[in-house]
Amino acid sequence: MDTQPQPAAPESLPHDCQTMPITLTFDDGPGPSTPALLDVLGAASQRATFFVLGSHLSTSLAMAVRIVREGHCLGNHTFGHARAGGISNQALIDEIATTDRLIHRAYRHAGVVAPDILPLRLPYGVSPADPRVDVLAGLRRKHTGWTFMLDDWRRPPPSPSALAEAMRRHAEVCAERGRDPMFCLHDGSRYAEARPNTVEAVRLFLNQSR
């Protein structure tokens, strides 16, 4: 992301995507760091949900298939990562539909049944005054937020150790309040940037959590 997104309350993920007390989600991929991130997740037996951009997914089918085959879920992050008001309502509807089709194609190629309703997260999150909320209501789709978004999207991003420590602290607060954390991180960007700090931060955090 390019600017600080608005916070958003989390919505439940489909049951098949919600299998662990700590939920990791990744936006803006598939990207150059996705393979390394999948290796880290696999080593820790941690599942995640990847909110993918259709613009990347259209040229990264093989990576999306790997994501699904390794037990993770794919979610819709629209096609082009437009912010609120950046495109018309109809264009947003078309972007969501196109990305849904690409995600379903990845599930078919992976030989895995897709969730009945694909999880969806709009770029930059939503606020009550966001005009995109009405679009989702018309589509009968819910926006998936987060309990904590990491600053790994900044340029430059925080160090891996700083990111991992922020995740650890948030997980502790959630545990004290009796709720499960849902982290929002990034395995790419709309410019297809690498996220090595994110990969290493996730490795550090998962190693600490064992």
Image: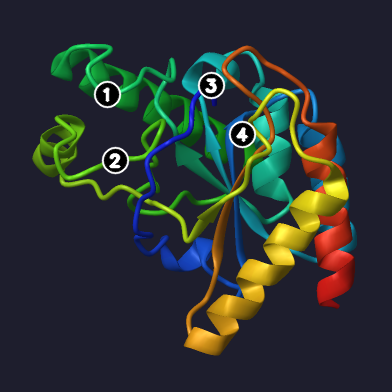
Q: What residue type is disc 2 on?
A: Val
For marks 4 and 1 on the same chain, the one whose residue lies earlier in the sequence: 1
Q: Where's residue 105, x and y in %?
A: 51, 30
Q: Which residue is mark 3?
A: 2
Q: Are marks 4 and 2 in contact (CB under 8 Å)?
A: no
Q: What residue type is disc 3 on?
A: Asp
Q: Are marks 1 and 2 in contact (CB under 8 Å)?
A: yes
Disc marking residue 164: none
Circle 1 sits in a helix, a strand or a loop, which is it?
Answer: loop
Circle 3 sits in a helix, a strand or a loop, which is it?
Answer: loop
For marks 4 and 3 on the same chain, the one whose residue lies earlier in the sequence: 3
Q: Are marks 3 and 2 in contact (CB under 8 Å)?
A: no
Q: Measure the alpha-carbon separation of dots 3 and 1.
A: 14 Å
Q: Which residue is mark 2?
A: 126
The residue carrying pointer 3 sits among few (fewer than 14), some (14 to 19) or many (20 or more) residues within 10 Å by Cα, namely few
Question: Which sits in the foreground, 159 or 179?
Answer: 159
Among the 4 quarters of the image, the one containing residue 67: top right
Circle 4 sits in a helix, a strand or a loop, which is it?
Answer: helix
